[in-house]
Image: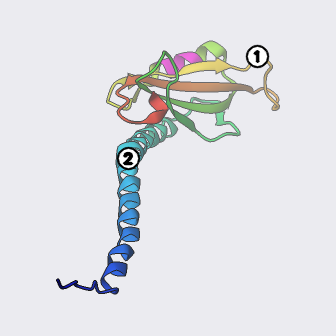
């Protein structure tokens, strides 16, 4: 009977390959996570950025100035329960116009929503006035809701 002796150099080569496969599995997991969860978030962030741009391009009514905050936007569940995306864009303004007139202006100023529907502004007037004489603080909100959530975790 003849015994064959194993070459000792052959065994370590097989053992050295496992870190490569572990790194490959980790890389595949990261890529899958990005494709499944982050890409839908980036898509909804782009939609929100376009909506914010359309709101900021809307001309201001007379005797009205931008407030101390820039245009603010958020995407996620703003109303209702879950499994849908809402887009909310908010603008802070200072105005001398009467409440009815500023509300009428933004009710008639339509902008294109995320998927093409017309949006109208909702006006909230600060009852305590403003730090500037003759001006009052106003918040104008544009809400576009109940869109497909996809895999965006903010909308579930």
- Residue at the spot 42% in from the left edge and 36% down from the top edge: 152
Tell me where residue 117 appears, x and y as whole percent: 34, 24
Q: Badges 1 and 2: C-beta atoms under 8 Å apart?
A: no
Label ID, residue 30: none
The picture quadrant where one finds residue 146 is top left
**Front one among 11 and 42:** 11
Tell me where residue 143 appears, x and y as whole percent: 48, 24
Considering the whole magenta stretch, tell me its main secondary structure.
Answer: helix
Give above or below for 61 relative to 16. above
Crowd band around label 2 with a 10 angstrom C-alpha radius: few (<14), some (14–19), many (20+): some
Instruction: Look at the numbered disc 2 and give the secondary structure of its residue.
Output: helix
Q: In the picture, which quadrant includes the N terminus?
A: bottom left
- Residue at the spot 49% in from the left edge and 33% down from the top edge: 154
Q: Is residue 129 magenta?
A: no
- Residue at the spot 81% in from the left edge and 32% down from the top edge: 132
In the image, which residues are magenta?
Answer: 102-107
Residue beneath disc 1? 127
**Front one among 148 and 106:** 148
- Residue furthest left as drawn: 1
Residue beneath disc 2? 39
Comparing labels 1 and 2, the label whose residue is closer to the camera: 2
């Amino acid at each position: 009977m003849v015994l064959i002796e194993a070459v000792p150099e052959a065994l370590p080569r097989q053992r050295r390959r496992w870190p490569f496969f572990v790194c490959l599995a980790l890389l595949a997991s990261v890529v899958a996570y990005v494709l499944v969860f982050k890409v839908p978030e980036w898509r909804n962030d782009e939609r929100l950025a376009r909506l914010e741009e359309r709101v900021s391009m809307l001309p201001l009514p007379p005797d009205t100035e931008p407030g101390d905050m820039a245009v603010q936007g958020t995407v996620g569940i703003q109303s209702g329960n879950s499994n849908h995306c809402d887009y909310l864009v908010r603008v802070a303004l200072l105005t001398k116009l009467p409440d009815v007139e500023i509300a009428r202006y933004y009710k008639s100023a339509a902008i294109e929503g995320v998927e093409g529907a017309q949006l109208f502004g909702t006006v909230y007037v600060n009852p305590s006035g403003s730090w500037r004489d003759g001006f009052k603080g106003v918040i104008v909100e544009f809400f576009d809701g109940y869109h497909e959530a996809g895999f965006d975790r903010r909308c579930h």
